[in-house]
DNA sequence: GCCTTGAAGTTACCG
DNA sequence: ACCGGTAACTTCAAGGCG
């Protein structure tokens, strides 16, 4: 029979008869599981001078032949564009792939092994051309199944034309733990509450009976298997909720069987909790697509996305949970607060899911993993799919030392306010340079190779050479991505904006663009399978040449270039001149240039990568300054933003000065709420690994001592308190600080004043002017 | 021993 | 576990001074 289904999750059963498991939803909305087969294999290339036939004999007569390698064949593939005759060795159990590779690599005559380090199902998806979150059709024979229909594939799945995703059953959840000491130890502290909300907005909460959470966890497990969600979403659920539930259930001897096949979830090495047959998405990971949200709390993300909960907003400090839980009159607060959070989780999930689905489709990674994987791996997964399509062997990952190279060019701006400024930039500059000059590892010509000048493109400054023909790997991939995006955008023009299909396509084209722009970063990543320093270095060099030539052309057209960074120029907006300039740039450089934005007024402090302006639509645009930096306290950012706004809108410096003074007064008087004084910084490693005792590290150490849990990647919020010691020694986690301990002088001198002066110093304001009132008051006191 | 200075370490931004 | 360029902060150790 024929089956049409949408691929939700992918798994594998290894062993002697390995199977790929495709979990999905069919066109009737039924949940299905498709078993497909695939022969595990790897490739072996011969050393130079060794014939592939003799290598075949060597492999056949080796002891490996006795092991369960089922077939060895001579096949034609490509290795970075060069045709190679190599051996394809098939075997039974994919788990042994690395083991066979190690053995085969030791045989005389073997140059290298390929594709032995790629996960079985990943290879299946790439080779067969199955794409997660897409519809496929295939012939199957039914194998029964109760909760979901089970099929055995008779043909491999083929992508079908259908694009609309099926209705996905969502389940948002969160837990609350009773931990009087704050230690959150699953061997001791019970899960007093598990709150859930389904995609239809139905909230169900599973409460512990007093401190006995056995029943709550059991009910939750059976609820999950009854409701049978396709997507499970939490916030911080990889690190906390699911791990805690798994460990707690283990401790209690409760089966935590929330997987679709009735098994228990598995925690991967990178801290992702995988729920078989469903997609588990941790919104904390997904929120990485919202860089505007600096401090990624549930509330902040919800506010940014304008997500609201039905349940009222109740604040329960987590340290108060045990007391509330034990006080009958206060217990409902925990239930309400938790309900509120879980509703936010669902609301955020609904907003982010389309993007996550698109990223899964474009990268080819399963929905469950795509947000957990780094950008490099998403690009690489897509590249592996393309490699196979053109018979390219996937290079092995090798460990390399970082080799720095020169990047983009930045022009130093002259300080001041400029009026009527146009910003133009190149459309996807790096990808288009890579296409234009055919920059790729497989087109690179090493210095000792002899070629005629017109056969190659030579990069400026660095002199790396790349063959003009045939089209390289990166060029082929990038051209395809650009073509796909263009096609999507063409289709969008024919649909009414605001329709669901339009949104779907918009998400897709954005994901494709993101992927396209990430390829340059990928090619210079030493961990990349397709890394070649010269590729990244040459691309950047051509980029510098491009922007420098652009600046020259602008000047030739009588346009002042106020600023330039990598692929953009800021010029005075004289429409006819800008038009002519942009035309000449495009014709001489054959790269598309497009207007980005227009400032009515723009301010430069003189520093690179920092400017602020009034756009032609009246909005204030701040770039690079403290205003947009998450590691400055809100009070400093607020003051700076207001100062910028006053200076740009009314150009009334006195007004700005008076405003700053008033804030300084308020800080001095202790009238600023503590939250606005908190400095949030990321802990990039564990506190012990640091070489210096910076404030956030001292604060982090103190938080850990007080029972807080912090790991690499966590944000620490701290306050500087009064005292005469070093700043670091006065940095305390904000939760441990009382308002009267705040060192208001520090906030005035090291936060508010620098932020304000960054702007005001360019308008003749002296630091003392901001402190005048304070100075006067001190003088009076004296 | 105290103060100045600049390098080193660190974070988060821009494109 | 994506690139380099950049600003800005705090710490820390070296150097100057006496």
Image (cartoon, coloured by chain):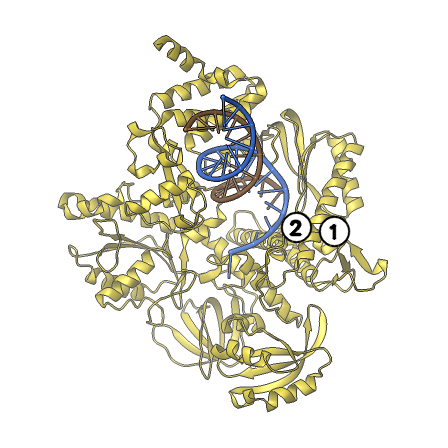
Chain colours: A yellow, B brown, C blue
- Residue C15, image x, y percentages: 56, 33
- Residue furthest to the top in view is A780
- Residue A415, image x, y percentages: 63, 26
In the picture provided, is C6 more to the left or to the right than A694? right
Q: Secondary structure at mark 2?
A: loop
Q: Please report the residue visible at 54 percent of the width from the left and 70 percent of the height from the top.
A: A130
Q: Quadrant of residue A314?
A: top left
Q: Chain of mark 2?
A: A
- Pointer 1 residue: A462
**Tag 2–tag 1 contact (CB < 8 Å):** yes
- Residue furthest to the left in view is A328
Q: Quadrant of residue A397?
A: bottom right
Q: Say few, some or many: other residues with alpha carbon within 10 Å of mark 1 (under 14 / 14 to 19 / 20 or more).
A: some
Q: Chain of mark 1?
A: A
How many numbered badges does the structure rendering display?
2
Query: Is residue A460 visible from the viewing direction of this image?
Result: yes
Quarter occupied by the C terminus of chain A? top left
Q: Please say if A60 is above or below A680.
A: below
Q: Please report the residue visible at 52 percent of the width from the left and 24 percent of the height from the top.
A: A757
In the picture provided, is A538 more to the left or to the right than A766? right
Q: Please say if A699 is above or below A208.
A: above
**Disc with the residue nearer the chain's start (2 vs 1):** 2
Is disc 1 on the same chain as disc 2? yes
Q: Say few, some or many: other residues with alpha carbon within 10 Å of mark 2 (under 14 / 14 to 19 / 20 or more).
A: some
The label number, if any, that marks residue A405 in the structure image = 2
A579 or A282, nearer to the observer: A282
Distance (Cα) linking label 2 and label 1:
10 Å
In the picture provided, is A647 more to the left or to the right than A421? left
Q: Secondary structure at mark 1?
A: loop
The label number, if any, that marks residue A603 in the structure image = none
Q: Please report the residue visible at 41 percent of the width from the left and 57 percent of the height from the top.
A: A281
Q: Please say if A738 is above or below A136.
A: above
């Amino acid at each position: 029979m024929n089956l049409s289904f949408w691929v939700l999750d992918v798994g594998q059963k290894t062993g002697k008869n390995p199977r790929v498991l495709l979990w999905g939803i069919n066109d009737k909305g039924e949940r299905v599981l498709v078993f497909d087969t695939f022969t595990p294999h790897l490739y072996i290339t011969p050393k130079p001078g060794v014939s592939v036939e003799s290598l075949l004999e060597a492999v056949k007569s080796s002891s490996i032949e006795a092991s369960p390698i089922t077939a060895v064949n001579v096949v034609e593939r490509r290795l970075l564009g060069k045709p190679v005759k190599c051996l394809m060795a098939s075997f039974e159990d994919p788990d042994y792939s690395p083991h066979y590779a190690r053995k085969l690599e030791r045989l005389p005559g073997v140059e290298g092994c390929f594709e032995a380090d790629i996960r079985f199902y990943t290879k299946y998806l790439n080779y067969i051309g199955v794409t997660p979150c897409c519809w496929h059709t295939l012939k199957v024979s039914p194998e029964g199944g109760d909760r979901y229909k089970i099929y055995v594939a008779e043909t491999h799945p083929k992508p079908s034309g259908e694009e609309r995703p099926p209705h996905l059953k969502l389940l948002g959840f969160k837990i609350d733990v009773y931990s009087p000491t704050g230690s959150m130890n699953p061997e001791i502290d019970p899960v007093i509450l598990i709150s859930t909300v389904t995609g239809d907005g139905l909230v169900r909460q599973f409460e512990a009976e007093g401190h006995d959470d056995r029943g709550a966890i059991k009910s939750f497990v059976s609820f999950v298997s009854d409701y049978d969600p396709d997507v499970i979403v939490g916030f911080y659920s990889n690190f906390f909720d699911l791990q805690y539930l798994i460990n707690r259930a283990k401790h209690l001897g409760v089966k935590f069987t929330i997987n679709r096949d009735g098994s228990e979830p598995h925690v991967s090495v990178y801290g992702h909790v995988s729920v078989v047959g469903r997609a588990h998405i941790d919104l904390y990971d997904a929120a990485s697509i919202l860089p505007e949200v600096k401090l990624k709390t549930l509330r902040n993300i919800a506010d940014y996305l304008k997500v609201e909960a039905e349940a009222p907003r109740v604040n329960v400090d987590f340290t108060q949970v045990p007391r509330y839980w034990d006080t009958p009159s206060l217990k409902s607060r925990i239930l309400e607060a938790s309900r509120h959070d879980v509703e936010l989780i669902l609301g955020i999930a609904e907003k982010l899911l389309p993007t996550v689905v698109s990223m899964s489709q474009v990268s080819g990674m399963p929905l469950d993993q795509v947000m957990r994987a780094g950008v490099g791996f998403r690009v690489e997964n897509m590249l592996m799919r393309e490699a196979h399509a053109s018979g390219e062997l996937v290079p092995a990952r090798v460990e390399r030392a970082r080799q720095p190279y020169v990047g983009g060019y930045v022009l130093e701006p002259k300080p001041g306010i400029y009026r009527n400024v146009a910003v133009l930039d190149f459309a996807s500059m790096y990808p288009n340079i890579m296409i234009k000059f055919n920059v790729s590892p497989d087109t690179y010509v090493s210095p000792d190779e002899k070629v005629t000048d017109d056969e190659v493109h030579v990069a400026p400054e660095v002199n790396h050479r790349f063959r003009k023909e045939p089209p390289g790997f990166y060029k082929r991939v990038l051209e395809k991505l650009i073509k796909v995006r263009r096609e999507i955008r063409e289709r969008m023009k024919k649909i009414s904006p605001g329709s669901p299909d339009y949104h779907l396509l918009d998400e897709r084209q954005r994901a494709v663009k993101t992927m396209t722009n990430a390829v340059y970063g990928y090619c210079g990543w030493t961990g990349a399978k397709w890394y070649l320093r010269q590729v990244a270095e040459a691309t950047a060099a051509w980029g510098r040449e491009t922007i420098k030539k652009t600046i020259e052309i602008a000047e030739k057209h009588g346009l002042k270039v106020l600023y330039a960074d990598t692929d953009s120029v800021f010029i005075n907006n004289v429409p006819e001149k800008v038009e002519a300039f942009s035309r000449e740039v495009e014709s001489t450089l054959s790269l598309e240039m497009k207007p980005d934005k227009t400032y009515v007024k723009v301010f430069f402090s003189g520093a690179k990568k920092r400017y602020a302006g009034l756009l032609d639509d009246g909005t204030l645009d701040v770039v690079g300054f403290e205003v947009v930096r998450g590691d400055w306290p809100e009070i400093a950012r607020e003051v700076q933003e207001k100062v910028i706004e006053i200076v740009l809108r009314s150009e009334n410096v006195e007004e700005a000065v008076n405003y700053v003074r008033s804030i300084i007064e308020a800080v001095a008087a202790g009238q600023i709420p503590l939250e606005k004084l908190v400095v949030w910084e990321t802990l990039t490693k564990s506190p012990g690994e640091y070489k210096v005792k910076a404030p956030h590290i001292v604060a982090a150490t103190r938080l850990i001592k007080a029972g807080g849990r912090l790991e690499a990647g966590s944000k620490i919020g701290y306050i500087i308190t009064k005292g005469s010691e070093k700043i670091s020694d006065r940095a305390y986690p904000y939760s441990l600080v009382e308002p009267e301990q705040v060192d208001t002088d520090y906030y005035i001198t090291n936060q508010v004043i620098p932020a304000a002066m960054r702007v005001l110093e360019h308008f003749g304001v002296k630091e003392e002017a901001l402190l005048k009132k304070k100075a006067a008051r001190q003088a009076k006191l004296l």
